[in-house]
Amino acid sequence: MRSIWRTLDRGLARDIGLVCLADCLVGVSYGAIAVSSGFPLWLPMLMSLLVFAGASQFMFIGIVAAGGNPFAAVLAGLLANARHLPFGFAIGDVLGERWAARLAGSHLMIDESVAFALAQREAGGRRAAYWACGTGLFVCWNLGVVAGAFAGTAISDTDVFGLDAAFPAVLLALVLPSLRDRAARLPVLVGVVVALAATPFLPAGLPVLLALAGVVVGALAKEPELQEAS
């Protein structure tokens, strides 16, 4: 672990630290929302340790709290985490060769750790960024969830504090730099339009899944460019 931190430059370490701080605050919001919605104190803590997937955790809590079926909530979470399959192919080289390292690394595979890893050009930098970000986020997220869960016992209405907006705000901050790429703007725009159009008519969680149509549109739009380049 010491070698990992020595590999990081100051700017990258600072960026990872800021993301960890932001995710800690999101963890606070998740714990508070879960407990104030009627879930037992231990549930958000256990999910954060075993699942460690903010989007799926928020989706499960939101769907069940809105009266949805728990099995449907689990299915929605699994579908949302299906993006981890291509993630695994993209950053498989940073997980190491040993099974223990690969299992631990897979558990730390979230949007932020993958994004930081893919932003590095050298293999050593990719590995350091992935493990530093993943480990830091795991610790900060769980600490935030514990604090938020206990705070949720004293907060009757989390909407007053706007805690439900914390997670989308962090995701937006991660997406914004990629919008400089012209090819990325089309799938993002399509996903946003689809999600907004479906929200008034579909149960919570489904509009987000339908927004994945933007990825398909982006892939179809990019295919002619690849053919021309070849």
Image (cartoon, rainbow, N blue to C red):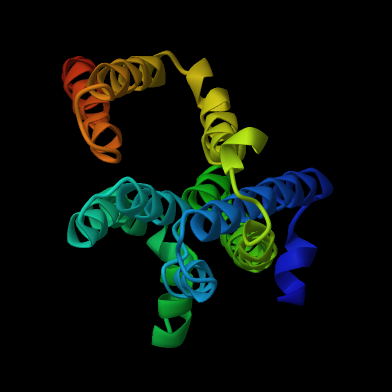
Find residue 97 and report its horizontal and vertical position in percent.
Answer: 42, 80
Is 140 drawn above or below residue 188 in the view shown? Answer: below
Question: What residue sits 69% from the left and 45% below the top?
Answer: 22
- Quadrant of the image containing the C terminus: top left
Q: Quadrant for the N terminus, please.
A: bottom right
Q: Nearer the viewer, residue 201 or 167?
A: 201
The percent position of residue 17, horizontal first and vertical second, equals 75, 51
Q: Can see residue 171?
A: yes
Q: Give the left or right position of residue 119, taking residue 16 as reference.
A: left
Q: Which image quadrant for residue 184?
A: top left
Residue at the spot 67% in from the left edge and 37% down from the top edge: 161
- Measured as percent of width and height from the top left, residue 203 is found at 23, 36
From what the image shows, is residue 97 above or below residue 81? below
- Choose between 212 and 63: the one closer to the eye: 63
Question: In the figure, is residue 186 to the left or right of 8?
Answer: left
Q: Which percent across, then down, holds residue 112? A: 54, 48
Residue pictured at 32% horizontal, 19% vertical: 196
Residue found at x 34% / y 59%: 88
Along the viewing direction, whichever of 130 and 138 lies nearer the viewer: 138
- Of 168 and 45, which appears nearest the observer? 45
Q: Is residue 30 above or below residue 145?
A: above
- Asked whether residue 90 is in view, the answer is no
Residue 44 falls left or right of residue 138: left
Total residue callouts: 0
Q: Is residue 18 left or right of residue 10?
A: left
Q: Residue lying farthest right?
A: 10
